[in-house]
Image (tube, rainbow, N blue to C red):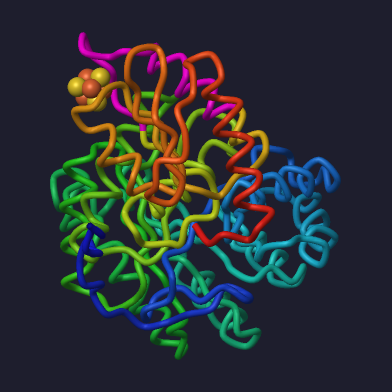
Amino acid sequence: MTRPVVTVAERRPTRQIHIGKVAVGGGAPISVQSMTTTKTADVEGTLSQIYALAAAGADIVRCTCNEPEAAEGLAQIVPRSPVPIVADIHFHHEMALAALEAGVQGLRLNPGNLRKESEIKLVASEARDRGVPIRIGVNAGSLHPEIAKRHGGATPEALVESARRELELFAEVDFFDVKISVKASSVPLMIAAYRLASETFDHPLHLGVTEAGPPPAGLIKATAGIATLLAEGIGDTIRYSLTADPVEEARAGRQLLEAMGLRERKGLDLIACPSCGRAEIDVIGVAAAAQRALEERQIPLQVAVMGCVVNGPGEAREADLGIAAGRHKGHLFIKGKIVRVVPEDQMVEALVAEAERLVAEGVEA
Ligand code: SF4
């Protein structure tokens, strides 16, 4: 019995912009972003991190442009990067101009700390002339002080008002190539702010729970906020802000989109039961060893490791490859059919061998 395909939600319609070769909004696939942690002036170090992020699933990478040396670095990084580069700008509009001159494919401006109207309009005019989009990156932690005061703090209305004001300034110089974020470290606040932003604007939205912290709690917070909104059809591009190696951010973003059926699966999808008193093999040990071995070999299949006959045969049959365990052994399923019985101590080896054979034969996941 094949399972019906279920989709999470109709995507809310937004305009489309292009960050270099990556379309954002307007029905384009939801993209994954991350940010480098190297000094941008360190060209080789930054490029090697960008390559690692792209390999882990990042479609767009942001680098800080906080000093003239960073802009000089960007001029060398952009032509060698495998993905479009967005320059992150705070406080200094001249760094935005320098990043544009360096050839970046996008800018992020923080309306909370880049506040002079003439400077904002100058940057928007320059971006308009070069065809470079800008993200209005509102953040609850650095909200425009006057807006924060009027709203009594960083409320959803205050975050959205900050974005709207910046949009109005951009419109004065005929610049509309914009995406918007209204991030907060509080998940409920972030969800409410994005819901309001989605009702207010038709620009693409960049989702994130800012400063989510180290994993695993950071992963849970970021997922709670981002996934809730995606399930409502809100969001066009996402970033996990983790206190960790940014490769983890890119991987998490990609895995979330794949898990929600919003991007095609590129990597392994391991289905494994949590194990319980009924388990007839060491499910946790076998699943962890299988995951390590299959990830190392970059196997792009769905593989099930199940501890007993309760849900085992059903899950193993639906996956590309699966084990449904009995007493210290298990039925090995390939594409829905039982092919043989494998002893517990040979399960990982058998899964790896069959996975490699399926991949070599070009079997579609
Ligand atoms: Fe327990 Fe079996 Fe369910 Fe695994 S499949 S959690 S062993 S009942």
The quadrant in which residue 238 appears is bottom left
Left or right, 129 with reference to 73: left
**x, y (%) of residue 359?**
63, 52
Residue 151 in the image: x percent, y percent? 14, 51
Tell whether position 312 is magenta. Answer: no
Residue positioned 73% across, 50% down in the render? 51
Left or right: 104, with 294 as reference point: right
Image quadrant of ligand 1 equals: top left
Range of magenta residues: 272-292
Specify whether 93 is left or right of 220: right
> Does any portion of residue 121 appear in the rendered image?
yes
Q: Quadrant of the N terminus?
A: bottom left
Depicted 70 relative to depicted 130: above or below: above
Q: Is residue 178 above or below residue 325?
A: below
The x and y percentages for residue 42 are 82, 42
Residue at 31%, 32% in the rendered image: 220
Tell me the residue at 43%/62% (across/down): 263
Q: Quadrant of residue 62?
A: bottom right
Q: How many marks?
A: 0
Q: Residue at x 40, y 12 (%)?
A: 328
